[in-house]
Amino acid sequence: MRFCLLGTLRLACEDREIRLGGARQRAVLALLLLRRGRTVSVDELAETVWDGSPPPTARTQISICVAQLRKLFREAGVDGEVIVTSHPGYRLDTDGHALDLADFLALAGQASALAGSGRTAEAADAYRRALALWRGPALDGLTGYALEQEAGWLEEQRLTALDDHAELRLSLGRHQELTAELAALVSEHPLRERTRHALMLAQYRSGRRADALETFRTGHQLSIDELGLAPGAALRELHNAVLREDPAIAAPPTVPEPVAAVAPAVTVAAVAVPAVTEAVAVPAVGAVSEVVAVAAVTDAIALPAVTGAVEEPEGAAESAPADAPGEAAADRRPALPVAQPVAPSDLPPNIPSFTGRTAETEVLDALLDGRPDGEPPRVALVTGVAGIGKTALAVHWSHRAAAAFPDGCLHVDLGSAPAAPGVVLGRLLRSLGAPGDRLPDDEASRISLYRRLLRGRRVLVVLDDAASFAQVAPLLPANGGCCVVVTSRESMEELVLRHGAVRVPLGVLDPADSTALLDRIVTGGRTAASPAQTARLAELCDGLPLALCIAAARLATRPHWTVRRLADRLADEHRRLDELSLGGSRVRASFELSHGCLSPGLASVYRRLSLLDVPDVPAWAVAALLDCPVETAEQYLDELTDAHLLEVSGPDATGQYRYRFQSLLRLYARERAQEDPDRPAAEAARDRALHSWLTVAEAAHRREYGGDHSVVHGPAPRPHVDRDLLDDLLARPLDWFDSERHCLVAAVTQAARLGLAALAWDLASSTVGFCEIRSNTDDWRRLCEEGLAASRAAGDRQGEGVMLGELGAALLYRGESEASVRLLEEADGVLRSGGEVYGAALNACKLAVVIRQRGDAGTARALLDGALPALRAAGDLSAQAHALNNLAQIALDAGDPEEAVRLGGDAVALARGLGATRGAAQAFHRLGRALLAAGRLPEAEEALTEAAGIVRAKHDRLGMAYVLLGLAEARLRAGRADRADEDLRAALVLAEETGSTVLLDRLRLLRVERAEAPAPGAELPQEA
């Protein structure tokens, strides 16, 4: 059978066409043909057939299509299986059959090899027969993204072959017959400069100089209009040559058709099948794709091998002289004799101070796997921000691994003086021994020659500071004996996807390696003599190798400086980048390279992100900053991460990824933010993001407390946050707090510094309840102190009173009762004088706790009784239950457990209206303690078990420890010592994890007094 893809999909057997079925059957066959020799999974077939949206029955329908195709083949008289079942799908076995695509690639590869050997006329005939195989657009009539992509790649192969064929025919003097064909091709593809170049040359050599100039003018205008770019250098140079009637572009003598034609087109079976399959299955772009196809078939053609020296066939000098008079530069395809293979050694000197990177070096060492020459080359992509040490690692490893590459090491700095791939190829070819005065001028021919010279050789190629995949792709060898190391600030997904590059991302050095790098450069033992200051200096340099090297060089050239002196200079954030940007190596300049590659919009996002003084940031907060959807914010963040200007961590406990600056990059971004042309808009965006933390924190508090209970709010605005997003973030409010804790403290601190007093104290007030649950008294205290300072500075009496009360509660929790009473009494005065009745009632409940603990039960009871009416008026069920819990504790302290049970029952009745909140857990716990004191052990255990269910679901470890203590006491008194011991052990572990010294002391005492009845005083910590 013969399969045909170059046009409509056709199938013929012994000159009899076989009718194929519907679109699905044709799509399945087409994809199997394109992946010939390789298994195609059922999933990939389904994705292709249904264009990314397969139905649930897709796998069954694919099986039906395959069965129908097998039936067609059998009915056509084909013996054996053509479509073979191969996990996880199917494979097309075409041994003994033909495929027009394989014939085309074989002939095109043969033609390229003949042209490279100087057999121009034979090459032109091979191209003619290859192009004659096309019956129309490839895969014509088949739709869907995947097949259309394949068709696009095949069309590019056809156009490349047409251009190659045209150049050969021009060099043979056949310009007259070419003009009309090229004019039609230019009309179809007006932006294809290589085709336009050939048309201009054909027109000029046919005596149509004016037409040639008009062809250039039309192309020039089209390029400006469509691309915003002038035509390429080759087209401009030809235009100038036409204007001055340069003899170099005159028509060469016409060469007649060769007497002996090239051998007939080989069938699929005669070509190196696996190689051609790879060329079809992994489409490349532009000239690279041509060479992939060429490399795939060269071994199947009887031509001189190229292993370091290119052999020139007999008669080649006469038929195609390298410097034939009148031959245009673009038409020359000379054979390049290389007398002896050259083993280049282009590596820069090794880095004497290189330090660390052990794991990354091991990844690169894995490239030395002795891969056969017929396989693709091994490629590594070293990425990271400017100054992170990409070049240092590449050069250090290259020297380390040089012995594994006996045929040489090539190195090109693509960043210091960016040049077109053709120019870079010229340098590489000269390093490989090709005579510089006889190099082909067009890029495609240089690529072909470069890869032929490398074939069969083991050469290391280092492509340093690459800007894009397009810059790298033409410089990649085609054989497995070679290895490539690319360094870049870009992620180059295409290099990973198409060439299997191993990513080697570089981060900052850890503290040990940072100090080791300083030690290696600074002599005289100064760093060893001041280890603390050396560690401080390394931290101020952010572990960035460039910054560390600059700092070390400053110390090395100033022997009278101490390490502390330089560290002190760097400690000033306003001077740090200046201190690290002296001389030829500048941290600021290196960052500007990365920043300069950003689009204006992305650069603006980067600058505005730096205005948030938070340790890291989730995407939802960036969405608030930019006033855009979260998905858009995530895209910006991913792009900045790809540019190595941000680092990503996570996911956090809520499933959100978090992004952060390196310290030096944050300082640089803030410098650029000062230059923002719209500072007011940038500052408004910053304030909107800070207020968004209040929106979410308030919602988290409501979910944890069953409503806006036990908290006073102010007038600060709350930006809208999507309800679905809140549901995702706050599925477990405590998890959100754990993830966001550092940012909440930083946001309150920044709001206070910016004079946003209402935001500072309101956000602190919405957050301290979570600090209490987590026993985090340090953050609790700092939040209140920042909110208090901001409120006092702004003259905000409401905020001042609320923050005094919350700070007093924090000190109560820390055991500082005298300071706590002083602050709570001051808060009471401020709140009452401002008419804040509800806030004063909440404060009275806090004050009652500390007054009770100091032994004044009567005053405590009066405070609580006085607060309850205001709490009822506010509808605050949580605070009412809290007050009743404290009254129950006073009753317990007075030896009246039945009264405590009554009050505890009232608290539980209120708490049930809150749902499964912490307030409900506290109410059940207090009731359980009262029942335990009353000797009602089964009821006590039941109430405590209810509390345990709530705190367990909330992952409240401290609350769980207190509940387990109560359960242990109840079970001990009920004679269930084994179960009580389990509870005590679990409670002790949780108490140690949370660092609660009060609870630890109580647990240890109980373990000592195992047989004694517990005093009814241990309690779940209350909101103060």
Image: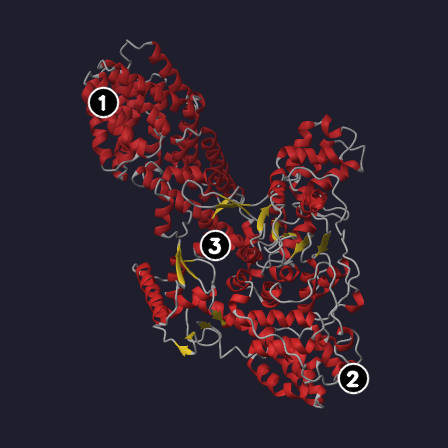
**Label 3 environment density (alpha carbons within 10 Å; few <14, some 14–19, many ≥20):** many
Classify the position of the C terminus by image quarter. Answer: top left
- Identified by mark 1, the residue type is Glu
Does any portion of residue 757 appear in the rendered image?
yes
- Identified by mark 3, the residue type is Ala
**Label 1 environment density (alpha carbons within 10 Å; few <14, some 14–19, many ≥20):** many
| Location of residue 237 in the rendering, given as x and y in whole percent from the top left corner | 73, 77
> Does residue 646 appear left or right of residue 930 in this picture?
right
| Location of residue 917 in the rendering, given as x and y in whole percent from the top left corner | 29, 35
> Does residue 63 appear left or right of residue 996 in this picture?
left
Q: Which residue is mark 2?
A: 244
Label 2 or label 1, whichever comes before in sequence order: 2
Assign a secondary structure to mark 3.
Answer: helix
- Identified by mark 2, the residue type is Arg
| Location of residue 13 in the rendering, given as x and y in whole percent from the top left corner | 42, 74
Above or below for 764 versus 824: below
| Distance in Å between CA atoms under marks 1 and 3 | 50 Å
Classify the position of the N terminus by image quarter. Answer: bottom left
Q: Which residue is mark 1?
A: 941
Label 2 or label 3, whichever comes before in sequence order: 2
User: Which residue lies at the image location 45% right of the left edge and 38% below the top edge?
Assistant: 741
Q: Please tell me in which quadrant of the rendered image residue 605 appears.
A: bottom right
Which one is closest to the eye, mark 2 or mark 3? Answer: 2
Q: Nearer the viewer, residue 686 or 480?
A: 480
**Label 2 environment density (alpha carbons within 10 Å; few <14, some 14–19, many ≥20):** few
Assign a secondary structure to mark 1.
Answer: helix
Q: Which residue is mark 3?
A: 633
